[in-house]
Image (cartoon, rainbow, N blue to C red):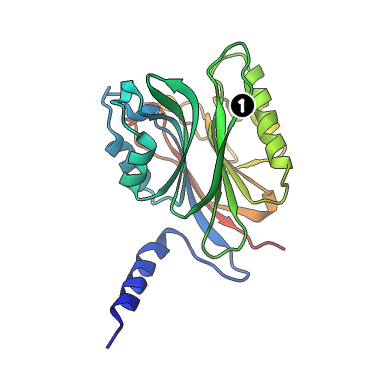
Amino acid sequence: MTNPMYALRFFLLVLFVPLTQFAGGDEPIKLRVLSYNIHHGEGIDGTLDLQRIANVILSVKPDLVALQEVDQNVLRSDSVDQPSELARLTKMHVAFGANIPLQGGHYGNVVLSRFPIQTHDNHLLPNIASGEQRGYIKATIEIPGITEPVVLMATHLDHRRDERERLESANAINAQAKQHPQLVSLLAGDMNAVPSSETMTRLGTLWTSVTDTPMPTIPVTAPARQIDFILYRPQNRWNVVDVRVLDEAVASDHRAIFAVIELQPGA
């Protein structure tokens, strides 16, 4: 007779394996990565709907997600703990980085992960001329099939026309990356900068974008500019399998960018 607990474990393994290609030895491992500015869950129709945001996320069955403009216990979004609620709706692990106190709560970035988050910490970025405080959350994630951790840094850079703060933020992010040059890492978020900008050029000295040509993400109804990105490093450890901008145009004021990338085995 089959052991019931063994059968249950086998069923769960089969259920979750398709989300990521588990690999061992010298085989690459595929990861499905999403970056999405969710506008605190408020769509362009004025409706606050976190289930709709969760549906967008779940539509591509991601392994790793970077979210921007997330509220935690903020009055304007009905004082809901959005990081916890999105974790519940997507059945993913969560880490929240609070950057701005707001209406009784906080506002910042989120990492969602299909896999356990080993560590996470939030880093405030340079603030110039009293702009909104920006930051990045750095999460170290345990990926089945490989022994080394994967780092996901989720960020949202300054939106003003003056590029000085974004450039200083790029320097700060690069300085963090230089501390561990061989650590396999992803950087995702709303950079508020187009691919040809000095900000993206500066990040490009250490990071590689999953897109070779611009893939517009805003305005959401008729995208004309790409300001949302997924980047990786070291360059020789990753291979891009697929990348696209999702066609959902109501749930937020940004479209989400999604990539399937392969992590190559280390030397």
Residue 201 visible in the displayed image: no
Image quarter (top left, top right, bottom left or bottom right) of the C terminus:
bottom right
Q: Residue furthest front?
A: 104
Where residue 15 sits: x, y (%)? 35, 65
Element carrying mark 1? loop
Q: Residue at x 62, y 53 (%)?
A: 238
Image quarter (top left, top right, bottom left or bottom right) of the N terminus:
bottom left
Residue 142 visible in the displayed image: yes
Q: Residue at x 39, y 38 (%)?
A: 83
Where residue 18 sits: x, y (%)? 40, 62
Q: Which residue is mark 1?
A: 125
Q: Which sits in the foreground, 9 or 241?
A: 9
Q: Please, is residue 161 above or below residue 18 in the view?
A: above
Where residue 233 sits: x, y (%)? 66, 47
Identified by mark 1, the residue type is Leu
Q: Residue furthest top?
A: 129
Q: Residue furthest bottom?
A: 1
Q: Which sits in the foreground, 266 or 90?
A: 90
Where residue 47 sits: x, y (%)? 26, 26
Q: Residue at x 55, y 48 (%)?
A: 119
**Quadrant of residue 167 within the rendered picture:** top right
Q: Which sits in the foreground, 206 or 70?
A: 70
How many marks on residues?
A: 1
**Quadrant of residue 78 within the rendered picture:** top left
Q: Would you call the spot at circle 1 few (<14 residues within 10 Å), some (14-19), or many (20 or more)?
A: many
Q: Quick check: 178 left or right of 253?
A: right
